[in-house]
Image (cartoon, rainbow, N blue to C red):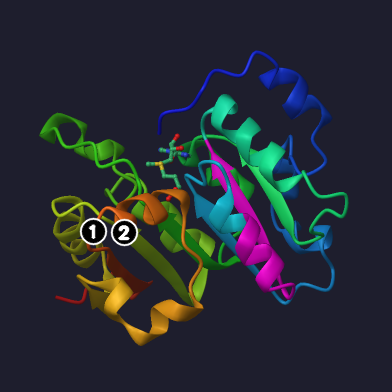
Amino acid sequence: MRIRYLSNTEEILEASRLLVRDPEQMRGQWRTLCPQAKSLAMEIGCGKGRFIGEMARKDPDTLYLGVEKFSTILARSIMNNEAEEELPQNLRLIRSDALDLDEAFADGELDRLYLNFSDPWPKDRHAKRRLTSDRFLPLYARWLKPGGELHFKTDNDGLFPWSVESLLANGWKILFQTDDWHACPEQKDDVMTEYEIQFSAAGKKIHKLTAVYAGSDDKVL
Ligand SMILES: C[S@@+](CC[C@H](N)C(=O)[O-])C[C@H]1O[C@@H](n2cnc3c(N)ncnc32)[C@H](O)[C@@H]1O
């Protein structure tokens, strides 16, 4: 993601009312941040925060967490989502690499996980960095409750089939899959991300899948 350098990134993070500064302290207790929430959902790689912010505004019964590894990008998300005087009570942001969040969630604590337009890392030697690689999938499998859904959208024609293979090889079951999400009737209820707006405006078809972890002894082929 290209982003203009913000000279006051640290001040923005410091003053943020949405930022969770010590996510490991929240392990098993995320719902206490928004007691009325009936479920917990998270986007990894939330970028400038359009998707996660809109989802929170649309669905007040869910606590939404946006995770972003770069401070400068997260600062944009904070600015965008704290611009209104009234903060969404059901939105929190986390500055972290997803790999460092292992201890931040109890088993089965998450109801839904979103990966939107994840960096494709096209070189083979960087494949482990893909958010759908076998370095990340076991974390998601542990964090999600049984039957908890992983939602993945991308414009990338290489990353999508690679991710399908990776999910299947790691014991996940694909519930829904399309190579043209915007032609699906279900899309009208979805929130578009910054990248999705750009790519679809440029005529690019969007791939989307929904998957659940089916268990390590029950791999679905
Ligand atoms: C291509 S951008 C997509 C942003 C947004 N989801 C969208 O669709 O507009 C991918 C984002 O994921 C973040 N990211 C990549 N790997 C990550 C990781 N391991 N943990 C947290 N964030 C990550 C990047 O810094 C970047 O902001």
Left or right, residue 32 beside residue 44: right
Residue in the foreground of this view, choosing between 157 and 144: 157
- Within 10 angstroms of label 2, few (less than 14), some, or many (20 or more) residues? some
Q: Going by the picture, which residue comes out furthest to the bottom? A: 185
Residue in the foreground of this view, choosing between 144 and 20: 20
Is 60 part of what is drawn in magenta? yes
The quarter in which the N terminus is drawn is top left
Residue that mark 1 sits on: 203
Q: Amino acid at mark 2?
A: Ser
Asked if ligand 1 lies within 8 A of label 2, the reply is no
Residue that mark 2 sits on: 200
Given contact means CB atoms under 8 Å apart, are the residues at marks 2 and 1 in contact? yes
Residue at 25 percent across and 63 percent down: it is 167
Residue 174 is at least partly visible in this image: no
Residue in the foreground of this view, choosing between 26 and 61: 61
Q: Going by the picture, which residue comes out furthest to the top? A: 7
x and y percent of residue 120 in the render? 25, 42
Q: What segment is highlighted magenta in the picture?
A: 53-68
Residue at 79 percent across and 58 percent down: it is 88
x and y percent of residue 55 in the render? 61, 65
C-alpha separation, residue under disc 2 versus residue under disc 1: 5 Å
Asked if ligand 1 lies within 8 A of label 1, the reply is no
